[in-house]
Image (spheres, coloured by chain):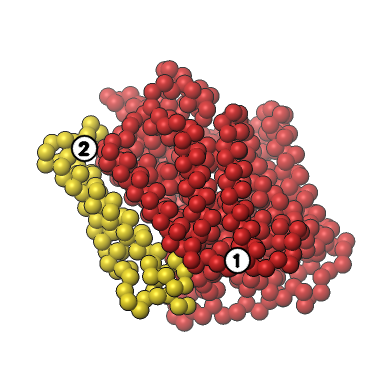
Amino acid sequence: MQSMAALLTTQLTRLTPVDILILVLYFAMVIFIGFYVKGSTNTSEEFFLAGREMSAWVAGLSFVSANLGSLELMGWAGSAYQYGILAMHWYWIGAIPAMLFLGIVMMPFYYISKTHSVPGYLQLRFGEGARGLSAVSFGFMTILMSGVNMYAMALVMKVVLGWNINFSIWVGAITVAVYVMLGGLRSAIINEVLQFVLIWAGAALIPILGLVEAGGWTNLKAQIAHNVGSNDYTHLWSTLGHFRDNPMGVHWTGIVFGLGFVVSFGYWTTDFLVVQRVLSAHNLRAAKMAPVIGAAFKMAVPFIVILPGLICLGLTNHGVPLYHLVGENAVNAAHPYSYNEVLPLMLIRYCGPGLLGLGITALVAGFMSGMAGNVSAFSTVWTYDIYGAFMNKRASDQHYVAMGRWSTIIGMVVSIGTAYLVADAASIMDYVQALFSFFIAPLFGTVILGMLWKRATNAGGFWGLLVGTASSIGMFVYTTFGGPAALSRIAISADARPMAETLYRALWSWIICVVVTVVVSYMTTPKPEAELAGLVYGATPIPDDGAKSLWQKPIFWAIIVITVFFILNIIFF
Amino acid sequence: MAEGTGRGEMLSIWFFVGGLTLVYGLVLLPYGAWEWFFHHEPPTVLNNLHPTFWWGLLMTLFGAFYTLRYRPRPGDINKT
């Protein structure tokens, strides 16, 4: 991205006073909310878990919104231009089954164990070792990701609007620090719900007007086929029979097992950043419904992310493709725009003053929400699972709240440092994003065995997580420096491309984690069943969630969502 | 009930959602009308469809509904 910024001598557009007014109103609202809810964040339960009083709708929207950052939106819109409709898998099979599984199967255990965090659950189930490992890696990752979001926002503002990088970093950081420090998770959740509405308000016009310009979906598909010389870009499954048959260079086994099972389940069920939102629900039924509601909205997100990428791919001017976007390393005077600029380019194409401000505000809100989500999750894990667990176990509740506020500020300062570090070496950004994938897949192996298998022991959980994570890092290093030969071994095909590496690496590291956990567990003494109550399936009576009618049952809505999911996959097969 | 903002608070999270969209609608609607009726359309694709005006109208209606539906009323303080 940095090379792109350096090559672009002129900004894409500029804001008019009405756009600036819209942006300023958003900042004013965000700061106001921070001050408004400060009075309701006096206890640790209120500061770190929003008082556990959110409805299913609020928790559900916040759950899906925490993942809807601008880095993700712009990246996947670019991937849709690059790989076609295959990018949709990351929103459908790469999210929906896992979200429903979290709500229906896993949430009862998280909720009734009354844990404050995912590392907290690991402590209850596997002891301090697994908790410490998970908490330290998660805290480290979130703070780096917050910095990456900060830098990405500053860079987008520079490229699109010509804003000074330092200005964007500091304004964004100070605003987020103020509202998270004041209102904790409650502030973050309210802003995430606002951001969800804003993203739709700011981005929905792009696919609507794009489809009008293209003459409808059927015409758009024909234009894409004409522009790229192939029908492969508009089919979800029919091209996945072999690695070389599709633009992404993946195989259906990688999509189904690597993405749909390991990566997706790992992210949506064990990444505390998103799980924390659901833990804020006010009762068990709301906690089960929140991911189901989130899944329903998640299914609609490709409309504002994937479709703009496809529209950009299909637009023509007298039979010639209107845009020729390239990878960031290939940006030059003849091809000044990279894949990542699809959304801003489409925004500028269809949105004049006012609407442009709304779109930019949506992007800024997405970036700030990404920072806030990471910082609030960091603050919780630091306070409960590192500081409270290993440094100061017997402090007062007030002390922990104060520590939460201080760790928010310190977290933001470290994030700012990370942002400048990334600014100096853009490749760090890729590594930071890759770091997340090291931990997620093995963590899912540990948590799922912990919840579903009574025989899993403390030593099994710890060593499974450690060896699984180490194997993921090892495979990453191997494929990074081993060239195509290494990639072909990890992804089991000479035709595999880099995207396949992530999926198969996750799959292998998960399998390694599970195997090590099982073997070590059988070699060590099992935990008494009495210690597993409330933590493991089979040792825990699941309490009634209070649903009286069919309409109130989370499982009913989950079946509706999964049915729609299958229908959509068949339609776009 | 002041949902989502904490015990003892008057303003619901949905009131904030409605308020912000209503304000945005009230900015976009007159601006879009000015563009349309005084021929100041921006040089964007499909500007003949007057998206700023119609989007502003939609946001105004959406925002007004939520603002009114979740406006603070006496006795609405969340005590749960």
| Horizontal side of residue A546 vs A483, given as left or right | left
**Callout 1: residue from which chain?**
A
| Horizontal side of residue A397 vs A240, given as left or right | right
Pinpoint residue A313: horizontal percent, then vertical percent.
Answer: 39, 33
Amino acid carrying label 2: it is Asn
On screen, residue B6 above or below A195: below
Decide: few, some or many residues near mark 1? Use Cα within 10 Å; few <14, some 14-19, many ≥20. Answer: many
Pinpoint residue A370: horizontal percent, then vertical percent.
Answer: 51, 48
Q: Chain A shown in which color?
A: red
**Residue in the picture at 45% in, 78% down:** B79
As drawn, the label of residue A66 is none
On screen, residue A146 above or below A292: above
Is the C-beta separation of discs 1 and 2 under 8 Å?
A: no
As drawn, the label of residue A44 is 1
Residue A303 can be seen in this image: no
Pinpoint residue A57: horizontal percent, then vertical percent.
Answer: 44, 65
**Callout 2: residue from which chain?**
B
Q: Secondary structure at mark 1?
A: helix
